[in-house]
Image (cartoon, grey):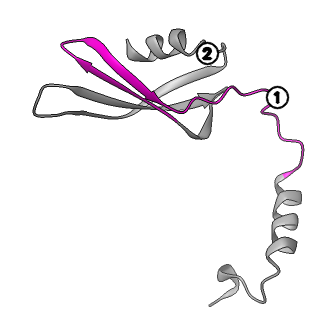
Amino acid sequence: DASDFLRTVLQAKPGDEFRIIKSTTDKLGMTHQRYQQYYKGIKVEHAEYLVHNKNGMVETINGDFKDIKGSVVPTITEQSALTQALLFVNAKKYKWECK
């Protein structure tokens, strides 16, 4: 299993997970699988890894793995985040206000 292989090679922590998002096979019979990294069920942006294999044997891997340190528990409420975003953008009118 390529996901288990990635966990081992990348020395992933128990909260790390790799979910396959795409798999293609080229004309030479090489299979290319793209995995998205998740940490404790949350998608890690810009953290994808590719596994290239032929006849069930991994040939190469490449990508970006993020070693997450810290909590995934939100420190602000949804309403507080929205308020801060609205203050930052400071638009005269928002799309949801248009009729």
The residue positioned 56% from the left and 22% from the top of the image is 17
Residue closest to the eye, 87 or 66 = 66
Q: Position of residue 38 (x, y in %)?
A: 59, 30
Instruction: Kindly identify the amino acid type of the residue bearing the numbered disc 2.
Output: Ala
- Disc on res. 82: none
Reading the chain from its start, which is encountered first: label 2 or label 1?
Answer: 2
Please indicate whether residue 29 sits to the left or right of residue 1 in the image.
Answer: left
Please indicate whether residue 54 sits to the left or right of residue 3 in the image.
Answer: left
Q: Was residue 73 drawn as part of the magenta stretch in this picture? A: yes
Residue 94 vs 1, above or below: the answer is below
Residue closest to the eye, 71 or 49 = 49
- Disc on res. 12: 2
Near mark 2 (Cα within 10 A), the count class, few <14, some 14-19 or many ≥20, is: some
- Disc on res. 70: 1
The residue positioned 67% from the left and 19% from the top of the image is 15
> Residue 74 lies in what quarter of the image?
top right
